[in-house]
Amino acid sequence: FDENGVIDVINPIAEDLIKVAPGYAKGKMIDNIIRNSDVFSTKNLDEKQLNQITDINGTYVSANKVPIVVDNKVKGAVITFQDIKEIQESERKIRRSLHKKGLVAKYNFSDILGESKAIKSTIEIAKSYAQSDLTILIQGETGSGKELFAQSIHNNSRRKNGPFVAINCATLSKNLLESELFGYEEGAFTGAVKGGKAGLFEIAHKGTIFLDEIGEIPVEIQAQLLRVIEEKEVRRIGSDKITPIDVRIIAATNKDLIEEVRTNRFRKD
């Protein structure tokens, strides 16, 4: 629309979203076509607005408004918007593609073998923990089946249709572990992938992240991990943007973390 708020051009998809007949909106004031939205108005015309969630005549959309500037003067604005339902469906497709890449939990409690009273009791406790959304720490010797329990808990939780992302914290260097967990922006460091890379916490959104051998995480990264747990948000290396996440954490270790805390190798908090 122009600087007076008159709609110059509108495409058929936009007409369908705002529920007007073909050609009806062209030449009319945008405030009369789309009401109760600051994005779709002549207010603050020179201000760029991105990813604004707003209601258009009963349909929620994500909208962007970018001013048209000619000879340093604002002559109008271009607005693009997308139905939130389409965005959600795209996200679901992304989640499904992640599953195809192997980000799934393959095992269930029925795969855990054993008839002893101890193993049966442990399975029952784990089943009850699966119903909550709290962080879980699994302690046990190497080879005792900690990841089997982690996958089983995920598969019996409300997050079972979300991704299960596992990482062995003992196998990566400090810098590599940091970039894998939190991701990075393009140009953040030498060798960074063009376009940047999402970290495992972002990939695990709406699912579970399994931090195996968590006792091996360097103290510096423990501080960053604490922020993710407390704030439920992550910031990629080299970025000033915060991404909210919804992730359940299951951690495992074969170390005595109480002793690690006493010797200042693991943060108490």
Image (cartoon, rainbow, N blue to C red):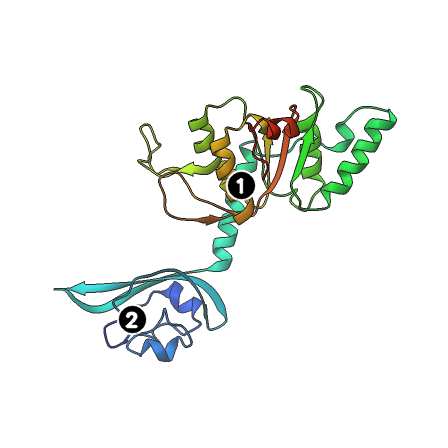
At a point 77% along the width and 39% down the height, the residue shown is: 127
Residue 117: give x, y in percent of width and height.
87, 27
Residue closer to the observer: 102 or 15: 102
Could you say which is closer to the camera, residue 158 or residue 254? 254
Farthest front residue in view: 262
The dot on residue 8 is none
Q: Nearer the viewer, residue 78 or 246?
A: 246
The amino acid type of the residue labelled 2 equals: Asn
- Which mark identifies residue 44? 2
Q: From this viewpoint, is residue 229 visible? A: yes
**Who's the residue at 50% across and 71% down the image?**
58
Under circle 1, the secondary element is helix
Query: Of discs 2 and 1, which sits in the foreground?
Result: 1
Percent across and percent down for residue 44 are 29, 71
Residue found at the very far top of the displayed protein: 143
- Residue 62 x, y percent position in the rendering: 43, 60
In whole angstroms, how far apart are the C-alphas of marks 2 and 1? Answer: 40 Å
| Above or below 247: residue 259 | above
Residue 226 marker: 1
Given the image, on which type of amino acid does mark 1 rest?
Leu
Decide if residue 79 is on the left or right side of residue 137.
Answer: left
> As displayed, is residue 67 above or below residue 6?
above
Looking at the image, is mark 2 or mark 1 earlier in the sequence? 2
- Density class for disc 2 (Cα within 10 Å; few <14, some 14-19, many ≥20) is few
Image quadrant containing the N terminus:
bottom left
